[in-house]
């Protein structure tokens, strides 16, 4: 009985998330809403934080985060993945983003933020790269893994403000263009090293 009650309660919470957080912010595409309704956010949190699954901000984890529903909704909307896409997910620590996108594409490969930042990338090239968090700089290893004409969608930390950003790879170059300001957890592995100056 308790499992039935829990399932009903989380279903109601997911619908409220869609109606009050996504639709009101311009996320209305059915493929986005369908995936976010289908995947229980609480499954990607430890039991003691499951009650925070549907709040409108990110939830910190010991080794990462579960970002806000709006971030994932906007990211999927910007990415618009197709069934032919081969997707690399740079993981934010929860596994949620990979599960959201998996049924929409031909294949999903996951790499940790730490490995991606230090150049330990999986073999192969990808038509789409999704980064689950905000980065300050984009390593060449990630650009190299994106095929020509492929799309990257990520959070971007620019002048202490986090934004959703995206870019196609054109003539070997990726130039991230901000889409909109959005609260996004920062992936510190991608921080630009601080340079020390002595006067």
Image (tube, rainbow, N blue to C red):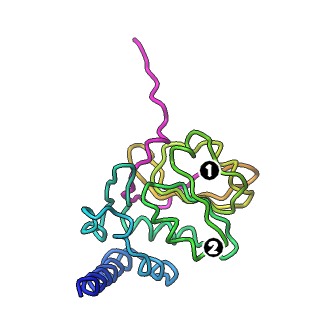
Residue 187: horizontal and vertical position, in percent?
44, 47
Q: For mark 1, give the secondary structure.
A: loop
Give the label on residue 87, or none: none
For image coordinates 41% across by 13% down, the residue present is: 198
- Residue depth check, mark 2 versus mark 1: number of the one nearer the observer: 2
Q: For mark 2, give the secondary structure.
A: loop
The answer to whether 144 is drawn above or below residue 24 in the figure is above
Report the magenta stretch's main SS: loop
The answer to whether 21 is drawn above or below residue 64 in the figure is below
Give the label on residue 175, or none: 1
Give the label on residue 105, or none: 2
The tag earlier along the polypeptide, 2 or 1, is: 2
Taking 20 as reference, is 35 left or right? Answer: right
Q: Nearer the viewer, residue 65 or 57?
A: 65
Q: Residues within 10 Å of mark 2 (few under 14, many from 20)?
A: some
The answer to whether 7 is drawn above or below residue 127 in the figure is below
The residues colored magenta run 176-199
Taking 157 as reference, is 147 left or right? Answer: right
- Whether label 2 touches label 1, CB < 8 Å: no
């Amino acid at each position: 009985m308790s499992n039935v009650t829990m399932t009903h309660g989380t279903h109601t919470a997911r619908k409220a998330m869609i109606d009050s957080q996504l639709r009101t912010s311009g996320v209305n595409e059915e493929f986005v809403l369908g995936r976010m309704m289908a995947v229980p956010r609480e499954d990607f949190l430890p039991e003691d934080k499951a009650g925070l699954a549907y709040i409108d901000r990110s939830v910190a984890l010991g080794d990462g985060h579960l970002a806000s529903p709006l971030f994932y909704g906007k990211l999927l909307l910007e990415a618009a993945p197709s069934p032919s896409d081969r997707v690399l997910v740079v993981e934010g620590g929860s596994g949620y983003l990979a599960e959201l996108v998996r049924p929409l594409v031909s294949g999903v490969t996951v790499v940790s933020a730490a490995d991606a930042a230090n150049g330990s990338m999986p073999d192969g090239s990808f038509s789409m790269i999704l980064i689950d968090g905000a980065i300050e700089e984009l390593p060449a290893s990630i650009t190299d893994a994106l095929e020509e004409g492929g799309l990257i969608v990520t959070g971007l930390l620019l002048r202490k403000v986090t934004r959703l950003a995206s870019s196609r790879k054109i003539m070997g170059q990726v130039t991230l263009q901000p889409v909109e300001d959005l609260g996004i957890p920062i992936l510190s592995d991608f921080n630009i090293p601080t340079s020390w100056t002595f006067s």
